[in-house]
Image (cartoon, coloured by chain):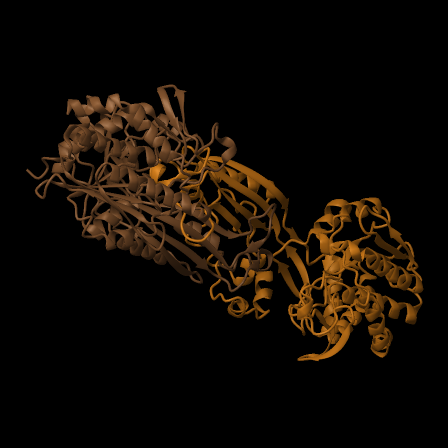
Chain colours: A orange, B brown
Amino acid sequence: MEKILAHIDANIDASLGRLFELLRIPSISAQPAHRQDCLDAANWALTALREMGFTARLSETTGLPGVVAQNHEAGPDAPHVLFYGHYDVQPPDPLALWHSDPFDPQLVDGPRGKRIVARGAVDDKGQVVSFFEACRAHLAINGKLPVRLTVLLEGEEECGSPSLHQLLTQERETLAADFVLIADTNMWNPETPAITISLRGLAAVEVTLKAASRDLHSGLYGGIALNPINALTRILGDLQDDQGKIRIPHFYDGVAPVPDKLSQSWATLGFDGQAFLGEVGLASPAGEHGQSPLAQLWARPTADINGIYGGYQGEGTKTVIPALATAKLTFRLVPGQDPQVVVRNFERFVIERLRPDAHVAFKHQGATPGFAMNPDAPFMRAAQAALSAEFGKPAALIGSGASIPIVESFKTILGLDCLLAGFGLDDDRIHSPNEKFDLACFHRGTRAHARLLTAFKSILD
Amino acid sequence: MEKILAHIDANIDASLGRLFELLRIPSISAQPAHRQDCLDAANWALTALREMGFTARLSETTGLPGVVAQNHEAGPDAPHVLFYGHYDVQPPDPLALWHSDPFDPQLVDGPRGKRIVARGAVDDKGQVVSFFEACRAHLAINGKLPVRLTVLLEGEEECGSPSLHQLLTQERETLAADFVLIADTNMWNPETPAITISLRGLAAVEVTLKAASRDLHSGLYGGIALNPINALTRILGDLQDDQGKIRIPHFYDGVAPVPDKLSQSWATLGFDGQAFLGEVGLASPAGEHGQSPLAQLWARPTADINGIYGGYQGEGTKTVIPALATAKLTFRLVPGQDPQVVVRNFERFVIERLRPDAHVAFKHQGATPGFAMNPDAPFMRAAQAALSAEFGKPAALIGSGASIPIVESFKTILGLDCLLAGFGLDDDRIHSPNEKFDLACFHRGTRAHARLLTAFKSILD
């Protein structure tokens, strides 16, 4: 292992040079004009993987192709790891806010040493290349990898992965690994690696209340005609109680309290809820009383109204009683909640509160359950040991307040669990101008990936 | 009196001819291109009034001029009546829905006999000319009017009377009458005249709740960050209780129950609340339990949210916790309520319910108190007797759910009470295509105006 790490340390400039090659390709998947650039990025990866001895090919889809590569020289009994990353990037706009060309990568000084600045520096080219470089070091020292490895790179992640389902389905046999390693998440802080072990799900529903057959003059009808905005606020105003609990019947059915062990480990993370909220002008955790800020963010379900509209929205006043009012809601869900049941219970909650003359219409707009990974699974334990060895402290076992749709795709289509262990930082400005990846993160990420590959060798024992 | 009425009957075709002259002038005050047409309509009225022996002139304003005319030959001891009408009309759009040119008046068959079809047929040219023709009949038979009369015609009523304040102020001495007769309202039904004896007032306020300093991702912040839409619905959802009562403290202070006598007279009007609501697709009076539909419309205050917006309003879903949410409210007020106090108590109602991190901003957007006229005032009693004589049944003493700003202007600027007795019908399509005035209403309106002039003769006795 030490030889491999020393090789990585000695070759960091060459690694960086290869990353810069990839960063120079403006593979913006959202913009059709950049289709060829996306293909160039895919081919860059093909070439890099083949150079390392992988069999590699493009897997065509109705959109941009996937890159599928394999190195199975570890032998048929070795664990099979599927690595997932993406070669596409977000558009760089607004360009004016960049301090350098987003596709001319720079190494500039930052408060924590050098940083790589470019679109895709961390999301996800930097993370992908750190993994490639770890493989390269293993191959340079040992001539083979410790595990059977399949690499899958997607080209449409920044567009919502419209072809991932097709890709996973058509490559089902090739991708039949023991688990998926995903390098597209962040560390807890610059000193502390992290493994994401839970994701909240999402159920989205739009509710429209209709009353009169047309907009009414509030002078002629006010007081006798049902106002659907009043009616809608009355119903939705009832969603939470004074303790921040959601009042939809059976909403918490199946929701387990945060296990004590996890809760205690979160307590050691030193999360400063005040500072977190302070950055966006807030001061008080607004969720369920009695739940820690991290539990509110990671482990408890929510009911947020993301949009509402009805009646007059211009300047001044219009004395109208509108015909309808609409709200868009999403529920962030945790493991144990069935998104369909949550939506159905919400609908019942609304219907039970309907006043005479209020007619309701619902639109369902997607539902994903929450995910919980087992931190004691062998690949998880192996990862924790490897990260601990690299960083000198245990990895934070964190939650994510948002869903990561690809995790659900791997689970539902391929039956695979995911290991979410990435080396970005929260201040990396992904999707924003001046995206960066700390050089130290790139370097230690490469070392950590090398250790992970070794650690995975024994997960089937 | 009979001679005067007979004169009106005998000359109805000539009266109609004069009305048609005025209807042919497209005096659309909202459209600058029609400014000359508006001046032509004012001058048409000047000429008509001078022909009848009035001294008449234009009263210039920063907008369109008023027409001010006087006939005081009844002598200094006679009561002084101020007649108010307007010579401007609404734009005729959408033109495609008219069955004939809006400015080429037609006499067409309708279910209740002939009807005059044109823009302004009833609002307000038909009503103004019916009054002029009543004066003409008095003058033809008696050579003078029974009262001192001042006529004031405004040219900007359809634009919200922006110059009325100036007009009333600069003509204060000329307009110093005993009361104002306004011919711009409707009968109760084709057989029953009406006097409007109460108007609801209006207080308008916009409320914005601000939370975070920017829009937040509900995956990253959901559960811990205050959602201002949730917070706003929670506050506004509390506006009414289960009985339809408004829960703002002191909201009903000063609100008197409908007097028994009035309540009983409303019960005789045969108002069909179900049918009234049925026309707009509703079935149930939505206001305070225990209040009749007419009381809900005319005599009880309201709290309507006329507009609400916040967050995402496009197709599909956006997982945003917005920075702010806004609602626009109007309160319809009844006599006894102080609009400023209502707004202040509403603000307190909101502020008391603010959750931590919710910051509120209010915009005041106008306030007018409710008005109640004394149906036993001498000019009111005189009017009731005159209308009863013409129609063979008592006038309905009705309320208006909406405010009529000119009534407040006459009261606050000139200290004058108004008599709202017009001869339109609810199906006259004012402001809409194919506006009409039943010929019978024009004819009986002229006769009724003639009787009113006579009846007013004795109001100072």
Give residue B393's position: percent from left, percent from top: 19, 23
Q: Identify the image quadrant of residue A192.
A: bottom right
Q: Is residue B217 above or below residue B456?
A: below
Residue B46 visible in the picture: yes
Query: Whole-percent x and y of residue A280?
Result: 53, 66
| Relative image position of residue A163 (x, y in whole percent) | 77, 48
- Can residue A460 be seen in this snapshot? no
Toward the viewer: A112 or A301? A112
In this view, the residue in front, A206 or A451, is A206
- Please name the residue shown 66% across and 67% down the image: A429
Residue in front for this viewpoint, A53 or B10:
B10
Q: Residue drawn 25% across and 22% down?
A: B9
Locate the C terminus of chain B and report the quarter of the image it occupies. top left
Asked whether, in this view, residue A263 is left or right of residue B20, the answer is right
Q: Nearer the viewer, residue B180 or B350?
A: B180
Q: Quadrant of the N terminus of chain B?
A: top left
Q: Is residue B44 left or right of residue A327?
A: left
Can you give x and y, in whole percent of width and height, for residue A363 in the image? 58, 39
> Residue sitting at 33 percent across and 48 percent down?
B161
